[in-house]
Structure formats: C-alpha cells, structure tokens
Amino acid sequence: MSAVKSWTVSNELWERVKPLIPKQKRKKKRRYLRRPGGGRKPMEPRKVFEGIIFVLRTGCQWKALPMKEFGSASSIHKYFLEWKRKGVFSRLWRKGLAEYDEMEGIAWSWQSIDGAVVKAPWH
C-alpha cells in the first residue's frame, strides 16, 4: 500500500475544483494556420492542477517539477499564470472559505494579524 502524497488531488477534491477550471476555446478573430483539432493536445487539467499543488506544497521551482509525473514544467507554469489571470484561485479560495464557514464557522468580525519587522543582518 503506497502512502498518499500531500500534493495528490483526491477524486472528491477534483470534483469540487473541476467546475472552476476555464474551458479552452479558440479565439474567433484570430487567424490560425492549423485546422481545429490540429497540433498538440492540451494538457489534462487535473494533471496541471496536481503540478501546481506540487509546487505550492514543496516550494520547488517550476523547472524542478518531475517531468515523468507532471509533464512540461513550462506548460504547467503557463496554465498557472492563465488560471491566476482568470481568477480560478480566488474563486477556489472563496469556495473553500464558504465551505469551512458552514462546517466550523469563521468569526468574520474578529481578526488578528501577527508579524515581525526586523532589520536584515549585515553580511
């Protein structure tokens, strides 16, 4: 029995995330050299999402993504930037907060901020 890795996206989580992922569309006014359906197929959105989660969980650089497991690191980064621009992660965060609020409750009227400001050491 293999251990579940912290970046593995369960079927249950994917079913919640899947509706938030934008569909790929051809731009109508753009002139294409290839016919529709020609060229390289887009990456599977779930694999892209798992690659993004891998980077967020491990803190690795984009180019350090394991090619065998996730495919092209630059493609996953391209999708990350596109999804960020389209608000996927903001919607995911809001949906998660709403779900947590239903389950546990969030004290929206009370907030606490913790931080420290220190000078950088001389080197």
Image (cartoon, rainbow, N blue to C red):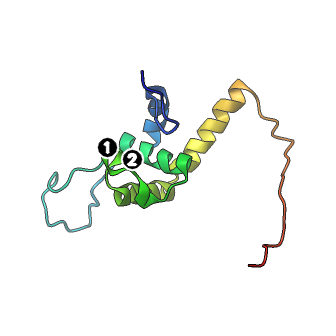
Tags 2 and 1 touching, CB below 8 Å: yes
For the point 43% across and 25% down, the residue is: 2
Quarter occupied by the N terminus: top left
| Residue 117 spot, x, y in % from top left | 84, 66
| Residue 55 spot, x, y in % from top left | 50, 51
Element at label 1: loop
Give the residue at mark 1. 44
Asked if residue 21 can be seen in this view, the reply is no
In this orientation, which residue lies closer to the viewer: 81 or 91?
Answer: 81
Residue sticking out furthest to the bottom: 123
Give the residue at mark 2. 48
Label 2 sits on what residue type?
Val
Q: Is residue 22 left or right of 53 when viewed as pictured?
A: left
Q: Residues within 10 Å of mark 2 (few under 14, many from 20)?
A: many
In this orientation, which residue lies closer to the viewer: 58 or 17?
Answer: 58
| Residue 115 spot, x, y in % from top left | 83, 57
